[in-house]
Image: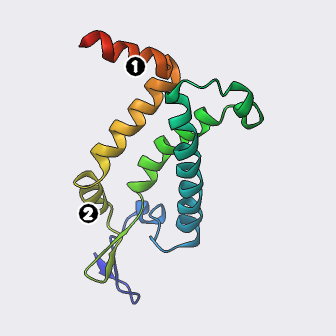
């Protein structure tokens, strides 16, 4: 364990080269991509659930649903490799990062990603029909 001069905690191991600082340009670019994909989801998910046929609208975007599902799946992995700030100190230790993420957003993220893939492969209408049939 070592403390660097920029008020961050790091372990001395090979995996430390994979850990992203939460304020690094790479992480900020990833966060901007996340915001864009959330914006897309906020627009198109309600339209899909409302029953409108948007196949013509989405054609220019190609397979964007698969791209977004893949993005959120990779985001779970990236979250395990991103340091976090605690009491003004950035913790870059992999075990601490994993514990922090697993005890905060991990379960929510997994449920959302699994549902995203289920909706993608079965279709929203099929999943909604399954939900009604269980009633």
Q: In the figure, is residue 131 to the left or right of 27?
A: left
**Alpha carbon distance from label 1 to label 2:** 39 Å
**Most foreground residue, 68 or 78:** 68
Side of 72 where 135 appears, left or right? left
Residue 76 horizontal/vertical position (percent): 41, 47
The single residue placed furthest to the top in the displayed view is 133
Query: Residue 115's quadrant in the figure?
Result: top left
Above/below status of 61 relative to 42: above
Q: Residue at x 35, y 13 (%)?
A: 130
Looking at the rendered image, the quarter that the N terminus falls into is: bottom left
The location of residue 21, given as percent across then percent down, is 45, 71
Residue visible at 58% across and 62% down in the picture: 32
Mark seen at residue 96? 2
Instruction: Report helix, strand or loop for mark 2.
Output: helix
Q: Nearer the viewer, residue 94 or 90?
A: 90
How is the model colour-coded? rainbow
Query: How crowded is the residue under tag 1: few (<14 C-alpha within 10 Å), some, or many (20+)?
Result: few
The crowd level at tag 2 (other Cα within 10 Å; few <14, some 14-19, many 20+) is some
* Pointer 1 or 2: first along the chain: 2
Q: Where does the image place residue 84, in percent across and percent down from the top left?
A: 35, 69
Res. 83 image quadrant: bottom left
Residue 128 bears which disc, if any? 1
The structure residue drawn at horizontal position 54% and vertical position 57%, both measured from the top left corner, is 35
Q: Nearer the viewer, residue 100 or 109?
A: 109
């Amino acid at each position: 364990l070592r403390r660097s001069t920029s008020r961050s905690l790091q372990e001395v191991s090979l995996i430390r080269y994979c850990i992203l600082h939460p304020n690094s340009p790479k992480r900020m670019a990833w966060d901007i991509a996340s915001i864009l994909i959330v914006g897309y989801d906020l627009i198109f998910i309600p339209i899909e659930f409302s029953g409108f046929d948007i196949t013509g609208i989405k054609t220019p975007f190609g397979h964007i649903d698969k791209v977004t599902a893949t993005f959120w799946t990779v985001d779970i992995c990236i979250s395990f490799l991103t340091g976090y700030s605690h009491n003004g100190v950035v913790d870059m230790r992999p075990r601490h990062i994993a514990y922090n993420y697993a005890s905060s957003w991990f379960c929510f993220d997994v449920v959302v990603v699994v549902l995203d893939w289920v909706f993608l492969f079965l279709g929203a209408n099929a999943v909604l029909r399954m939900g009604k049939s269980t009633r």
